[in-house]
Structure formats: C-alpha cells, structure tokens
Amino acid sequence: MVPQRHLGNDERRAVIAYLKTFSGRFATDRPRPPVEVPPPPPLTADVIARGRRIYQKAQCAECHGSGGRGDGPSAPTMKDGRGLPIAVPDLTRWPLKRGSEPDSLFYTITTGLNGTPMPSYSDALDPGDIWALVRYLESLTPQERRQPLDRLFPGEEVKGQEIEEAARRASAR
C-alpha cells in the first residue's frame, strides 16, 4: 500500500485500527520500540558515491539489480512469506511500498519488510551507512519518474533536480 496522504490523522488511525482486526497479534504482542531516524546527511556526490559502494557491498543488486530496477539475478526466485512468487520492486519507480520520502526509505532499510524477502539491515549497517544508501537510491530515480508524486501526494517534497545533479557528480568519480 502506498502512502495515503489525502487522509487526515483521524482517518489514518481509523484505517490502522481496522487493519489490526485482521490479526490477533495486535492484541497479544507488545510493540517494539520505535525506530529512531536521525537527520539525513547533506546531499553530496561523496555521500551518493558512498551509498553506491554500500549497495554493492550489501549485495542489494542480487535482488534489485545493478540499476535498482528489480531485475537482479535472484529476482525471479523471490517468494513472499507465504511461499508465493513476489515481484522485486523497481526502486526507480515511485511511489514505493512504504513511501518514497528519504525517512521512509531509511525506515525500510533499517527494519526490512515483513512478509517479503527484504531483510533488516539494522545490525549490518550503521545509520550513516543507511543514509548514504538512501541518498544513492534517490539518485537512481530520474526526474520524470518523480513527477507523479507531486500530483498523488502534494505534501511530499521532491528534490529531483538536486538529487540528479549530485548523482551526476558521483558518477564522474
């Protein structure tokens, strides 16, 4: 489900309360502590280049492909938590499942996505590495693939040209 920015806080809480009725876990399991999302680093070519190295070292391309398009060598064999085939997300097409804002990407990388092959990287990467990876992932999305977000989610800040400029500088290194 993509973010539903058109809903007010009360409406979002009502949807969440309804969704919780689908699983008894919400009545019995204790919630985990919230994930702290530190402030992002400045958007620089160095940060994007560091993120590219982390993407390679963390083997993100195995599933997401070298360009983040969901076409990695393991992509055809991916299954969800029920054992059903799953499409690996194309990270260059927004909106993404948990949202396309930098904080949402940080959260997804930190916690993983339950029911999918996407693992948590909280034990493998420190927050600075995760932010560098987020900046790199942002650089993979061309401006024309960001435009619909302005229409779908008016509150979401899109700094496409700034990200693309930093990505060009990082590629030149």
Image (tube, rainbow, N blue to C red):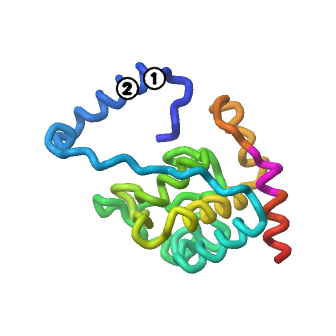
Residue at image point 57% right, 74% down: 61
Q: Say if 71 sits above or below 41 in the image.
A: below
Mark 1 and mark 2 in contact (Cβ < 8 Å)? yes
Q: Give the left or right position of residue 139, taking residue 79 as reference.
A: right
How many angstroms separate mark 2 from mark 1 (CA)? 6 Å
| Residue 55: image location, x then y, percent | 59, 72
Residue type for callout 2: Arg
What residue is pinned by disc 1?
9
**Other-residue count near label 1 (Cα within 10 Å), few / some / many at <14 / 14–19 / ≥20:** few
Which of the 4 image quarters holds residue 129? bottom right
Residue closer to the observer: 163 or 67:
163
**Other-residue count near label 2 (Cα within 10 Å), few / some / many at <14 / 14–19 / ≥20:** few
What residue is pinned by disc 2?
13
| Residue 123: image location, x then y, percent | 40, 69
| Residue 23: image location, x then y, percent | 21, 40
Q: Give the left or right position of residue 141, taking residue 40 as reference.
A: right
- Magenta highlight range: 159-164
Residue at image point 23% right, 32% down: 21
Residue closer to the observer: 154 or 116:
154
Under circle 2, the secondary element is helix
